[in-house]
């Protein structure tokens, strides 16, 4: 088969019971090349009991975004647990199309104007907003109206947010009482990465960069560090997302940045034993999304 969805990770606690959907808060992350979801059990104080990740695998002529979306939709429709009644279901969009605006500058109705400063915007684009209280800002993101209809057809009325809003809120809340002048957070995605820098308990920088090679990635990261006055010999880069220690991306990061660390799980979340085999820095946004009040 030239194009199919392949399961990358599948972790479910033995106590997970899809026959009791009212127990669970499910977060679903829609990506350009697949989807993932996490399951928190409200009957166990929000304990994380499930995670599954699907990625599109193409072995022939590449197909377009619409065809990939159809493939994802067909897969989700087969899962009655995800699309049926749940205690709570939250949808997250994973993309680079975001604009962070201080709330002091925002007024109702200005979303399209601010978003349009950074991204092309057409009549079909709907601009949504996540309020990041820890940052005192609004995270604006654009989504095509047909994509919103696709989500509504799949899940009915659901709350839709952006994955980067989770990244920002969780990091800012986790380290709000710590000085982090010597750390920079790097959240790595398949074709882009996000950088978060917190200083004096305030968000100083959030940006994303597209990369096609590991050389692109280290170039942009070193550029950011230079602009922020951070010394690669002294500043620790904390890695999150889709990166492994044995990868070429890690190799080039380690070559140019003296101190490299991997993110850890938030201690306020309880995890089933089935997550013991999964590195703590992976799936950072979807596993921490249940903590956010967006």
Image (cartoon, rainbow, N blue to C red):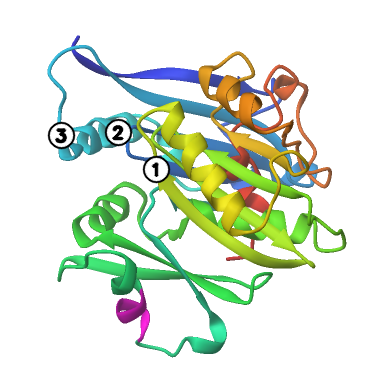
235 to 160, vertically: above or below: above
Q: Is residue 113 magenta?
A: yes
Circle number at residue 30: 1
Q: Main secondary structure of the magenta part?
A: helix
Mark 2 and mark 1 in contact? Answer it, CB < 8 Å. Answer: yes
Residue beneath the point at 38% across and 35% down: 191
43 to 19, vertically: above or below: below
Q: CA distance from mark 2 to mark 3?
A: 13 Å
Residue beneath the point at 72% across and 37% down: 263
User: Which residue is denoted by mark 2 in the rendering?
Assistant: 72
Quick check: 265 left or right of 187? right
Task: Identify the image quadrant of residue 149.
Answer: bottom left
Mark 2 and mark 3 in contact? Answer it, CB < 8 Å. Answer: no
Q: Secondary structure at mark 3?
A: loop
Residue beneath the point at 62% across and 37% down: 240
User: Within 10 Å of the Cα at label 1, are there few (<14), some (14-19), or many (20+) other Cα atoms?
Assistant: many
Regarding residue 169, the answer to whether it shows in the image is yes
Q: Looking at the figure, which quarter contains the N terminus?
A: top left
Circle number at residue 19: none
Q: CA distance from mark 2 to mark 1?
A: 9 Å
Q: CA distance from mark 3 to mark 1?
A: 16 Å
Of badges 2 and 3, nearer the viewer stands 3
Q: Provide the residue span drawn in magenta.
A: 110-114
Task: Identify the image quadrant of residue 110.
Answer: bottom left
Dot 3 or dot 1, earlier in sequence: 1
Quick check: 271 left or right of 37? right
Quick check: 83 left or right of 277? left
Dot 2 or dot 1, earlier in sequence: 1
């Amino acid at each position: 088969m030239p194009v199919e969805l392949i399961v990358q990770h599948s972790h479910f606690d033995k106590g997970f019971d899809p026959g009791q959907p009212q127990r669970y808060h499910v977060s679903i992350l829609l990506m350009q090349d697949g989807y993932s979801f996490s399951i928190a059990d409200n009957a166990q104080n929000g304990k994380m009991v499930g995670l599954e990740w699907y990625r599109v695998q193409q072995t022939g002529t590449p197909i377009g975004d619409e065809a990939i979306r159809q493939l994802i939709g067909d897969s989700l429709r087969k899962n009655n647990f995800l699309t049926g009644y749940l205690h709570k279901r939250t949808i997250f969009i994973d993309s680079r199309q975001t604009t962070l605006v201080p709330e002091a500058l925002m007024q109702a109705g200005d979303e399209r104007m601010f978003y349009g400063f950074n991204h092309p915007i057409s009549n079909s684009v709907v601009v949504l907003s996540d309020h990041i209280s820890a940052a005192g800002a609004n995270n604006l993101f654009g989504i095509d109206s047909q994509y919103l209809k696709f989500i509504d057809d799949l899940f009915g009325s659901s709350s839709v947010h952006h994955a980067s809003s989770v990244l920002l809120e969780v990091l800012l809340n986790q380290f709000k009482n710590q000085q982090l002048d010597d750390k920079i957070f790097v959240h790595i995605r398949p074709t882009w990465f996000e950088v978060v820098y917190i200083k004096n308990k305030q968000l100083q920088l959030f940006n994303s960069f597209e990369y096609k090679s590991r050389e692109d990635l280290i170039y942009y990261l070193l550029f950011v560090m230079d602009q922020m006055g951070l010394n690669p010999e002294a500043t620790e880069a904390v890695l999150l997302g889709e990166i492994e220690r044995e990868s070429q991306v890690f190799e080039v990061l380690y070559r140019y940045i003296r101190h490299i660390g991997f993110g850890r799980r938030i201690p306020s979340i309880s995890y089933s034993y089935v997550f013991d085999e999964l590195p703590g820095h992976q799936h950072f946004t979807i596993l921490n999304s249940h903590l956010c009040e967006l």
